[in-house]
Amino acid sequence: MDSAVPDLPAQPEILAAFHESDGSRRERWTKQHPMVAIANGLRIEFPISRRPLPWRPFHPFASRRAKRDKRCLLLLFWSITLAGDAMPRLLAILLLLAAFPAVAQDFGPPWTTALSATHPLVGRIWSPAEGRYLRQQDLSDRLGKADIVLLGERHDNPDHHRLQTWALEKIIAAGRHPALAFEMIGPERKAAFDSRRAAAPDDIDGLGEALDWAHSNWPDWNQYRPLFALAVAAHLPVRPANLSKETVQTIARGMPVGDDAKRGYGIDQPLPEFLFAPMAEEIRQSHCGRLPERAVSPMVDVQRARDRVMALALMTDAPEGAVLIAGAGHTRADRGVPLHLRVLAPGRPVFSLAFIEVDDDRADPASYGEAYGAATPPFDAVWFTPRATDDDPCAEMERLMQRKAMDRKSER
C-alpha cells in the first residue's frame, strides 16, 4: 500500500456519515473523503484539485501535480473495492473515466506570483469568440497553425513571461521557425545586438548587455532571459519592434516628422472618432489624468505608430511567420497590431493570446472585457494568471513626480 494513501473509515461509518441529519458534517466528510463517497454512488463534486490538471508527462509544469493525482487515483481505485455491490463500483469507474477529459484541461504552473492564486479563473484559458474554456492542447494547436502570433503581457508579471516561453516552445515544436520581435527592443539597439550574437551566440546575458537592458526601464532582464535563450537555442531571428526613443519624443511633442515618415508610421490620416475616442481615454488613464489635454492626440499617434512598426516587424523577411512579445494593449484584436496586419497583410492567419491578471471581484471571464472597453476581452484567447502586485501605479507616479520636483529645486 502506498504510504501516501490515508486510512479510510470502514464502509458502515461511510454510510452513517451520509445518513446523519447534520448537513455540514456531510459536507466536511465529503471534502475529506471524496473518492470513497464516489465509490458508494453518492452524488458529489470531483475535487481532485481546484483546477483541471495536466496528464501529459513531459509538460514543464506537470510533475508536482502528476504525483498528487497518482495518489488520488490510487485512493479512488482502493475505494472502489470498499463498495458492497456492483452498481456503486460501476458508477465509480464511469466517474473516473469521465474525469479524464476535465482533468486534461488547462492548468496553472507553480506560480511565481501569489496574489489571488486561488482565484477560480487562475490557470484557465478562455476563448472569447466561442465563449468557452480551451484545453492546453487546443491552445497549442492554434498557436502552431497561426502565421503570426501575438503574445500580450503585463510587463511586470513574471508568470506572463514564463507562459510566453511556453507558447514559443509549442510553436517551435509544431515545426515552425518564426522570427521573434520584441517591443522592448528599439531600432537603435539592433546593430549592437546582432554583433554580440554573431560574436558570442551562446552568451545570453551578453545579449542583455548589448541591449543595455539594465538602463532600459523594462522589468528585470531575468524575466525575459528565457525567451532570448530559447530564440538562441532554436536559431530564431530576433528583431526590434518599437520606435526609437528619438522618434517617440518627436511625435509626442507634436513636432513634424515628414510626410513619408507619417505614411510609414500610419499616422498620415486622422483616426475615425470611434477608434480615436477610446484610445485617447486609455492614454489619459494610463497617465493617471496628469497628461495635458493638448498632449493626448500626439500620444495617440505614438501608440498608432508603435502598432504599425510592430506589424511591419512581423511581416518583413519572415517566411516562417513571426511572434510578437508586447504589452497586451498592442495585441488586442479589435485595434492595435492586428488592425494594421489586416490592412498590410490581409489573409495571413493571426492569433492573439493575452495573459491577464485576475480580479478578485470578477469570476466571469467575459467581464474582463470591461477593462478594454469591450463586451468581452478583445483577444483570440486569454490565459488568466495571479497578480504580480496590488501597488497603485498612480500613487507611484505621484511619488516620482514629487521626487523630480525636489531634485529640480535642489539643483537651483
Image (tube, rainbow, N blue to C red):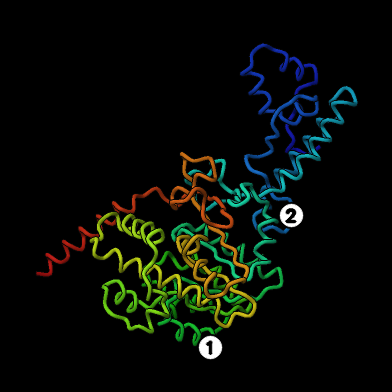
Query: Callout 2 environment at 10 Å: few (<14), some (14 to 19), or many (20+)?
Result: few
User: To which quarter of the image does residue 351 belong?
Assistant: bottom right
Task: Mark 1 and mark 2 in contact? Answer it, CB < 8 Å.
Answer: no
Q: Is residue 228 above or below residue 294?
A: below
Tag 1 residue: 199
Q: Nearer the viewer, residue 379 or 384?
A: 379
What separation in Å lies between label 1 and label 2 (alpha carbons)? Answer: 39 Å
Q: Quadrant of the N terminus?
A: top right
Q: Nearer the viewer, residue 142 or 204?
A: 142
Residue 38 in percent (x, y) is at 77, 29
Mark whose residue sits in front, 1 or 2: 2
Give the residue furthest to the left: 412
Residue 203 in percent (x, y) is at 54, 79
Q: Amino acid at mark 1?
A: Ala
Q: Amino acid at mark 2?
A: Arg
Q: Quadrant of the C terminus?
A: bottom left
The dot on residue 56 is 2
Residue 240 in percent (x, y) is at 47, 77
Question: Going 57% across and 70% down the picture, which residue do you hit?
Answer: 323
Give the residue furthest to the top: 21
